[in-house]
Amino acid sequence: MLSNIFSLSFLVSLLAGTIRLATPILIPALGQIYTQRAGILNLSVEGTMLMGAISGFTVACATGSLWLGLLTGIVVGMLFSLIMAWLSITVRANQVIAGIGLNILGAGFAAYLYRVIFGIRSLPAQIDSFQQINIPVLSDLPIIGQIFIQHNILVYLAFLLVPLTWFVIEKTTFGLKIKAVGEHPKAADSKGISVYRIRYSAVLIGGAYAGMGGAFMTIAYMNSFTESVIGGRGYISVAVVIFARFLPSRAMWGALLFGLASALQLRLQALGAAIPSQLLLMLPYLATIAALIFASKKAEFPSAYTLPYSRLER
């Protein structure tokens, strides 16, 4: 057993799996950087990812177009997050309660849609998912090629979103407005910045990313939909944002950390390790708890984090 664990092939497969499994955590985490920087705690990421997963899978299955399925997942993610935006910004409801409620709604509605569309089957409906990209010469490189150059296109797009998110947040006027409404919405409002519009935009962007992450799970990682397809990744992505202190580069490393925990438990199960499978399945969630314990103490939250804003209040 130990000889297999410390072998080069185990390490290569572990690192390649880490990158793949980090992707559906990284994408929604990057979206939540926009949302949480604007002062909104959106805990409905899990439900949003489920809605993106079922809608993306259904459209890809019906049309045969994986890209159309991905686009549908993004749009549905935005529409579902619009409910969260309305509740937290317009209605000014408690953001924690609203997010948990929408997660329950998303889980139930996604399962209902699957039953209505595909019926009850002995085997789940399946599609041909995105295939890995084979780059001549590079894909055949030993070790490096196996780890970095044998993934599907959405994996690479996810990691390209890291510098893009950093640029938008740090180097654009829109990013400056997001940080302004998250830190001091009254001051931003006095300067002519629409707090409501910016916060709505931030929540919708977060929903688009979450929908993309959910669609990734069904049309790029797996080739089917199940009610447990997201498996807590929405909650983990929210934790990654706090762990990363709202920085895209740190979010990438945080997602890779949780991806490593997930890949490790899968590889150990495949080797038949003499460890109860239930304990192995706990690894990603234990890593999440540990990261929150150590990182939350140093995290600097926006001053108006989770606080609703009203122009009528002084």
Image: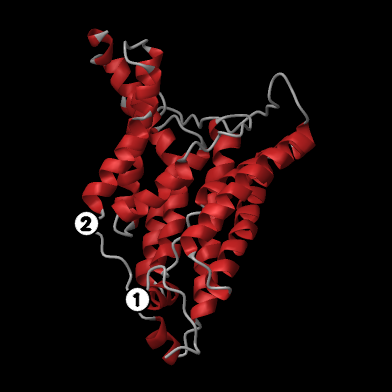
Image spot of residue 257 (x, y percent): 31, 39
Q: Nearer the viewer, residue 220 or 304?
A: 304
Q: Nearer the viewer, residue 176 or 300?
A: 300
Image spot of residue 106 (x, y percent): 62, 48
Query: In percent of the image, x 47 and y 40: which residue is there?
Result: 232
Q: Is residue 35 above or below residue 16?
A: below
Q: Is residue 279 above or below residue 3?
A: below
The amino acid at mark 1 is Glu
Query: In percent of the image, x 31 and y 35: which residue is there?
Result: 286
Image spot of residue 294 (x, y percent): 21, 48
Q: Is residue 145 visible?
A: no
Image spot of residue 196 (x, y percent): 53, 78
Give neighbour class at mark 2: few <14, some 14-19, many 20+ (Cα, 10 Å).
few
Residue 80 left/right relative to 149: right
* Secondary element at image label 2: loop
Question: Which residue is the site of mark 1?
Answer: 183
Q: Is residue 190 visible?
A: yes
Question: Which residue is the site of mark 2?
Answer: 297
The answer to which quarter of the image holds residue 80 is: bottom right
Quick one: quadrant of the N terminus? top left
Q: Is residue 33 above or below residue 293?
A: below
Q: How many marks?
A: 2
